[in-house]
């Protein structure tokens, strides 16, 4: 089965796992997803992730993402995809969005990699808005 929006699928898996209070979730592996997960770890929304091989098929790798909770409540309250395959959303550095007046984070795909909105503002970089996390 082909997934049209693999990043949207990853965000939905994380959202659904946290709603069910799972400690970890398996996501199909890709380099771009790892960059997004690295940015989420830097911002404190996830604990970590590790690359695991499937037992049945040795060529298939997945990412085991360990989710973060504080006092039993998930750290990620809301996660939403902004730029989609059917409609890409780009922004300049001077018009980067503020998610919930700075309490949340927007992940931006820039020429320097995946950065949070604050990191992109500091480096004066614009790019594609991937998602908002709060």
Image (cartoon, rainbow, N blue to C red):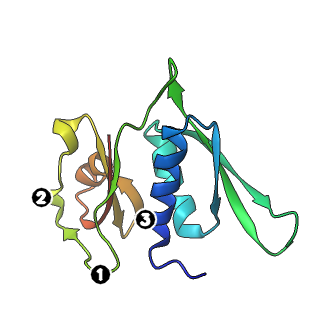
Q: CA distance from mark 1 to mark 3?
A: 12 Å
Q: Secondary structure at mark 2?
A: helix
At 12% from the left edge and 58% from the top edge, which residue is drawn? 94
Marks 2 and 3 sit apart, C-alpha to C-alpha, by: 24 Å
* CA separation in Å, label 2 and label 1: 22 Å
Disc on the earlier residue, 2 or 1: 1
Q: Earlier in the sequence, mark 1 or mark 3?
A: 3
Q: Residues within 10 Å of mark 2 (few under 14, many from 20)?
A: few
Q: Position of residue 39 (x, y in %)?
A: 46, 50
Task: Determine which quarter of the picture holds residue 31.
Answer: bottom right
Compared with 87, 114 (above or below) is above
Instruction: Reply above or below: 127 against 34.
Output: below
Residue 24, placed above or below residue 4: above
Among numbered discs 2 and 3, the one appearing first in the sequence = 3
Residue corresponding to mark 2: 95
Badge 1 marks a residue whose secondary structure is loop
Query: In the image, is 28 to the left or to the right of 73?
Result: right
Q: CB atoms at circles 1 and 3 under 8 Å apart?
A: no
- The residue located at (22%, 71%) in the rendering is 90
| Along the line of sight, the residue nearer the viewer: 108 or 99 | 99
Name the residue beneath numbered marker 3: 8
Q: Kindly identify which numbered label has been placed on residue 86.
A: 1
**Neighbours of disc 3 within 10 Å: few (<14), some (14-19), many (20+):** some
- The nearer-to-camera label among 2 and 1 is 1
Foreground disc of the pair 2, 3: 3
């Amino acid at each position: 089965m082909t997934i049209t929006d693999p990043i949207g699928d990853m965000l939905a898996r994380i959202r659904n796992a946290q709603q069910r209070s799972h400690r970890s979730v398996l996501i199909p592996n890709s380099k771009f997803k790892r960059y997004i997960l690295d940015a989420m770890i830097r911002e404190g929304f996830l604990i970590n992730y590790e690359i695991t091989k499937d037992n049945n098929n040795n060529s298939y790798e997945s990412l085991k993402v360990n989710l973060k909770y504080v006092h039993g409540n998930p750290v990620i309250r809301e996660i939403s995809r902004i730029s989609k395959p059917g409609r890409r959303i780009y922004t300049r550095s001077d018009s980067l969005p503020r998610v919930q007046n700075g309490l949340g984070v927007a992940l931006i795909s820039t020429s320097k990699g995946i950065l949070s909105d604050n990191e992109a503002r500091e480096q004066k970089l614009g790019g594609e808005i991937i998602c908002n996390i709060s």
